[in-house]
Amino acid sequence: MDFFAHPFWVWIAIGGVFLVGELLSGSGWLLWPAGAAALVAVVNAFVKVEWPYQVVIFLVVGVAFTYLGRRFLPPAPKHHGDINDPAHRLVGQPGDVVGGFHGGQGRVFVDGKEWAAELEGGGDLGADAKVTVTQILTGARLKVKPA
């Protein structure tokens, strides 16, 4: 059978090439032409369209998809370093004091975990007080201030 006699499969293959390119690059730009190729394939499944018009449909829809996708869909969040390291997201988070602070030292419950902590300015703080993380210290220690 002649492969080009079935434009549906040709456009599916073109879309697949764009998807593989997107997977390899992670740019976010090649996803939209892949969708445009899929749309042209679906159009060809229902309506016989000549090759030059298929290319025009692909180009117009590809530009429209790219513009709309980049304009209205939020970009993926940028990760700082190791995505499994919670340190970059802890600063500014609220927490609960566990057992109280004595001499500026204590423990807090932040982000679903219990952490060793130092109180800004030292001093004491009662149990069940609310704090906010201000800094990540060396090791697994946080610097906190009363909320």
Image (cartoon, helix red, strand yellow):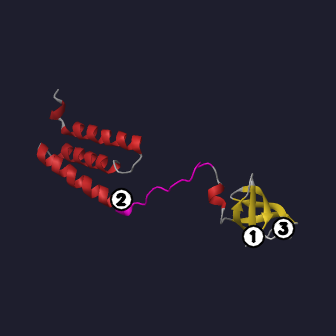
| 3 vs 1, front mark | 1
Counting residues from the start of the chain, the first of labels 3 and 1 encountered is: 3
Taking the image as shown, residue 143 lies to the left or right of residue 48, namely: right
Amino acid carrying mark 2 in the image: Arg
Q: Main secondary structure of the magenta part?
A: loop
Amino acid carrying mark 1 in the image: Lys
Label 2, label 3: how many angstroms apart (C-alpha)? 48 Å
In the rendered structure, find residue 127 and report the number of the disc placed on it: 3
Amino acid carrying mark 3 in the image: Ala
| 2 vs 1, front mark | 1
Q: Nearer the viewer, residue 147 or 48?
A: 147
Q: Nearer the viewer, residue 14 or 92?
A: 92
Residue with the mark numbered 2: 70
> In the rendered structure, which segment of residues is drawn in magenta?
70-84
Estimate the x, y position of residue 47 in percent, counting from the top left.
15, 46
Counting residues from the start of the chain, the first of labels 2 and 3 encountered is: 2
